[in-house]
Amino acid sequence: MTTRLEPHPFFHQQLHLAVGQPIRVAVYTRLADGIRSGVFRLGEMLPRETELSAMLGVSRTPVREALMLLEEDGLLVTRRGVGRFVTDFIPHGGLEQLRPFEIALADPNMTLTVQPVRFELEGVTDFVSHRLSLDPAANAWIRESVLLQDGVPVATVQEHLPAGRYLSDVSARIASELSEIAAEPRTLLASMQANGHVFTNSVCQIVATDAGPTRAKLLNIGPSAAVLILTQTAEHGGVPIYAAKCVVAPGHGSLSVRQHNPN
């Protein structure tokens, strides 16, 4: 069992609060990032609620709520009369929360990278029109990427956002940042979340099908190879503005969904 007597420099960073984001979510995100990145070591005791509250500059209530969520997600354990400790094993994040696909597909023993392929404006497809509630004559942005594990392609990701007023009326900041973040070596969702944009009411659907010639070429597999297709739709400010399709190659491994007993 270990604990720190002095505050870690990690707490010197100002807590980022996005507009409309509950404080407990920001606290949860900061602490979860610290646990998953190794700032807090496995088995290490966390500072107490009052100390965390002072270090993060927030009241005890959101800190307590965030700690409860971290415990529910298996990142912390409580030892009565002693305190809260980082678990001895960090569970891999699954599909139960809205996560960028590079995080949902990550393997702790391998390096996963995002390789952008194209970023273009094009007419909407039925997939985009339906999920983003766009007029069939509208245009939308598409950003396509390949996800690689140790240099081997394991998935493709197509991300779609509305164009023009369909986007700027919902979020002028996302519209102004889009071209810049599309050049970053990560998915658009990862970049937007890192910039403080909060997406809600997301849906993830999973189906199995054949790869087809275009996807097969990007993944270096046969066109008739079976693949999993994961689709995400997410809202910003109550409006659906993000739709994505991730095609996972065979042999990638498992996708996890953490389950809780409601009793």
Image: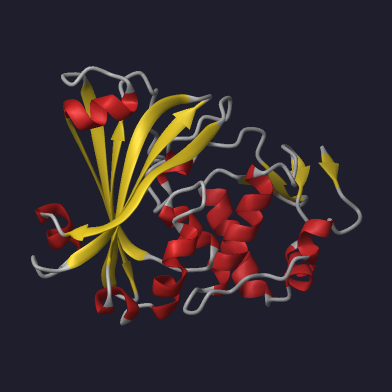
Q: Residue at x 64, y 67 (%)?
A: 63
How many numbered marks does the figure carry?
0
Q: Is residue 33 left or right of residue 52?
A: left
Please determine whether, in this image, residue 168 is positioned above or below residue 222.
below
Q: Position of residue 186 (x, y in %)?
A: 49, 47
**Quadrant of the image containing the N terminus:** top right
User: Can residue 260 be seen here?
Assistant: no
Q: Position of residue 29 (x, y in %)?
A: 58, 59
Question: Which of the 4 quarters of the picture holds residue 126?
Answer: bottom left
Closer to the camera, 71 or 206? Answer: 206
Please determine whether, in this image, residue 152 is positioned above or below residue 104.
above
Please determine whether, in this image, residue 217 is positioned above or below residue 239.
above
Question: Which of the 4 quarters of the picture holds residue 87?
Answer: top right
Residue sitting farthest toward the right: 5
Q: Position of residue 102 (x, y in %)?
A: 46, 41
Q: Is residue 14 left or right of residue 253?
A: right
Q: Is residue 233 left or right of residue 194?
A: left
Please determine whether, in this image, residue 235 is positioned above or below residue 126.
below
Residue sitting farthest toward the bottom: 169
Q: Position of residue 85 (x, y in %)?
A: 71, 46
The structure's colour scheme is: secondary structure
Q: Residue at x 10, y 70 (%)?
A: 135
User: Can residue 52 be seen here?
Assistant: yes
Question: Which of the 4 quarters of the picture holds residue 240?
Answer: bottom left
Q: Residue at x 49, y 34 (%)?
A: 106
Q: Residue at x 60, y 71 (%)?
A: 62
